Amino acid sequence: MSAALQSYVATLLIYLGVNSIACWGLNLQFGVSGVMNFAFILFQAMGAYITAVLTLPKATAGSAETYILGWHLPWPLPLVGAGVAGAVLALAVGSFALRPRRRDFQATVMLVVSIIASTLVVSEQGWFNGNQGLFGIPQPFAGSLSLLPAGYDWFFVALTAGVALLVLFATDRFTSSPWGRRLRAMRENADAAESLGTNVRAESLKVYVAGGAIAAISGGVLVEFITSWDPSGWGTGETFIFFVAIIVGGLGNNFGAFLGAFLVLGVFLELPTYLPQLSNSNVEESLQSAAIGVLILAFLWWRPQGIIPERRRKLSRLVPAAAREPAAVESAASVREEKREPTTAVTREPAQAATARSAELSVRDLHREFGGVHAVDGLSFELVPGQATGLIGPNGAGKSTALKLIAGAMPPSGGHVLVDGVDVAGWPAHKVSRLGVIRTFQHTSEFGRLTVLENLLTAAPGQPGDSIGGALLGRRHARPRQLELLEQAWALLADFQLTAHADTYAGQLSGGQRRLVEIMRALMARPRILLLDEPMAGVNPTLRLTIEEHLRRLRDSGLTMLMVEHELGSVERVCDCVIVMAQGKLLATGTMAELRRNEEVVSAYLAG
Amino acid sequence: MSQVVLSLGFGLVTASILAIGAVGFTIQFGVTNLFNLAYGEIMTVAAFAAYLARTTLHWDMWLAMAVGGLCGMLVSLAMSRCVFMPFLQRGTSQFAMVMVTVAVSFILKNVLQIWSGANFYSYQLPPEPSIRFLGMVFDARELAIIGLAVASLLGLHLLFQYTRLGKAMRATSDDAGLARSVGIPTSRIVSAAWLLSGLLAGIAGVALAMDLGTFDSNTGGSFLLLIVAAAVFGSVGEPYGAVLGALVIGIASELAAIISPTLKDVVAFAILVLVLLFRPEGLRSGRVQLRGEVTA
């Protein structure tokens, strides 16, 4: 190879490395966790600037270049500094931009941040030399290595590859850990994840910070190679080029992100240099941007999962063989149970094995207003521990709202919710669920692109590797507890007769099966009070009987349940006592038979 | 002090344009639950349409603005019918839909840029005599823009409170399924929302181009951020909140411009950040909204 060609190939490889790092960072945020960071380019830019000012010596007074710091640090400290700066910036931006619950609001706020930041950098000459930007940034080891230019390029390729491998190692550990599973669950259904103990805002912020640091590192490597950096290099539009790359390559996996970096940022954006020059470079740029729009539409239409889709994780093969034997299921469950509660020597059924001791719940004078409408209006009741209670009433009586208020899915306007004497009114759902108050949803809320087994595993509390630090420790650290949970989940699947679907994406199951997944998932969270919001809605009659059977057995095992349901037959068969609500208030309580004799109830509801 | 009053006047003009745009944005979001980041491009297309009407057909500016409004309606409806609806019917997720709107915005903006040769355009309006009012200085055109905003907002208020169409829109935004089950033709109501928001975008786009003096293919897109800030400020989907947001952000950003022109956007944004910190779903969240429960 000639020297020029060598240098060209090396340059392309370095760009591929830098863009891969960036794409892995964005994939962690968007592909894995569903956080739409429309300020992505800002983090890369910040990394570049910080690397530059940490590498450059102090700005000399009177020179044309003004900037902050100028610490003249040796490699790799500037890169480390860039990562830290990216993380700090992400923490600052994320602390307000991640506050709205809708991802699209968050994205737009970030877009605004990105634009404002670039306005500020341009106008504040003293930070990073404004519009002219920084230049003449020394390359790492440039002085101490006596290499020819082409030789140095290859050295830099190795350097980039080293950093890229480190980032790949970290992001791979993140995605394959229990923490990564939690992030994917959050992406699929934030409300359901929240109800199972995920603090969605906090986890999003962690991902935002990790991705921000990675983006900044990519910017740092880039600026060390190109030795200059100015505002024209990080227009807001650049963010979308990275989005296109990971959408085309494939969301949620590092292979896809790498392929996207290669195809979009390498081939697609490099290609025009080989085409005959158009008369006007502005036209060329516009065409390229328009083509990016077309690419987004085309992929979201024909191949929304990208060229390399996220891999389906077949966890069933990890389930210990002993646990997979049908005969072993019950004994395994009972053994586990004995380990935890040595006093209970009675062999329980697997579905019950997953439940812990029941808690007491009492609701006092609960209120919720929607713009003048009193959806729940002074509701008070107490659940009898270990019993199943039905909550019925006509449409709009406030049953589902009451359930949401208890579970923390929305704050009450007033009143108290006492769990074992602790007032949890106004607590966020993830905190309430940590007390063992677990709610299922009126509309099925499975994590669609997680397998059934994964759905179950996400709900279990106390998993090593279910944190950003724990994830970095790798599979071996997480494995013992994972195997234990897999065994437990398998026992549930066997009990609900869904083992054949263990590795199926939950979103591909029938409506009734998804209900079962939801109930099993709730049981994995070791509930002490189970709140069921219309578990029979949209379920065929046969499966309805199955669900009833399971709920009855849970009741018999001593789990406290509160069930909102329209199917009165089911309520009668499952529940010990029933609460009737009308117009936000408690109308009557009693057994179903008693209520049928209560004229007020009959006229309000049962007859109609 | 006189400088402050003077800026207050500019602020009122900006706020008026912002209010028309933000209400249009918020109505469409409220009814369709889609965060449309291509909204700014509807404004730009309308500004160019008005330009053609004015320079090639030599129409009166206000007539040209009507052309812009009409064009905004068409672009808005076409966008929803040809792109957004098909994607939604295909089951594209909420966050993927934002990418779809970004893609449409990219395509429109860049096609316009090629077509317009990346040049700046002007309606070449003759200077108007200035009118002093309480220490603020307006020209007749600026007063007309303020008047237009007041009239549009009043019209919208009447529409939502007293007409069948307006009530049907509110019902659809609250619960489309329920609205359909009580016999409201929701698909027609949704189309009406796209048309109405397109009309408001078109008027806002032309008014913005008049106010700025010159415009290019990026004008609407950059203004969109202020619109979003105003809409998010007052809880997206809540028209009255959007007007409030427009007033606060419009006036505050012009006042900040006294200190430094670059502060204009920074201040608008700082207000947004503060609101988000204390009321993540916007200032008027929890009230009766065009779209009832945004997050559930």
Image: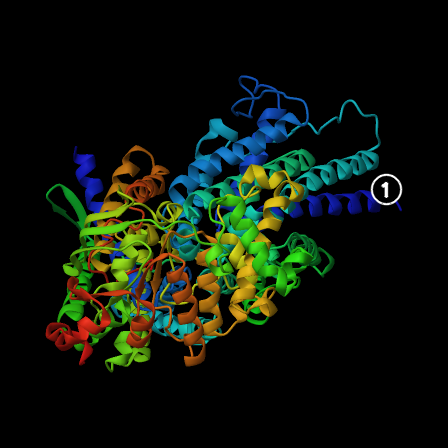
> Measuring 16% from the left and 43% from the top, which residue is drawn there?
B136
Residue under circle 1? A3
Which image quarter is the N terminus of chain B in? top left
**What colour scheme was applied to this rendering of the protein?**
rainbow
- Left or right placement of residue A292 versus residue B285 in this view: right
Query: Which percent across, then down, holds residue A479?
Result: 64, 45
Query: Which percent across, then down, holds residue A247?
Result: 58, 59
- Left or right placement of residue A98 versus residue A338 in this view: left
- Left or right placement of residue A429 versus residue A134 in this view: left
Residue B112 seen from this side: no
Residue A143 seen from this side: yes
Which is nearer the eye, A468 or B94? A468
In the displayed structure, A376 sits above or below A548; it is above
In the displayed structure, A600 sits above or below A454; it is below
Mark 1 belongs to which subunit?
A
Which is nearer the eye, B13 or A189? A189
Label 1 Cα crowd, 10 Å radius (few <14 / some 14-19 / many 20+): few
Query: Which percent across, then down, holds residue A207?
Result: 51, 44
Which is nearer the eye, B295 or A590? A590
Q: Amino acid at mark 1?
A: Ala
Which image quarter is the C terminus of chain B in? bottom left
In the displayed structure, B250 sits above or below B24; it is above
Query: Which percent across, then down, holds residue A513?
Result: 49, 71
- Left or right placement of residue A72 versus residue A340 in this view: right
Q: Where on the picture, by quarter, is residue A102? A: bottom left
**SS category of the residue bearing label 1:** helix
> Measuring 32% from the left and 54% from the top, which residue is drawn there?
A409
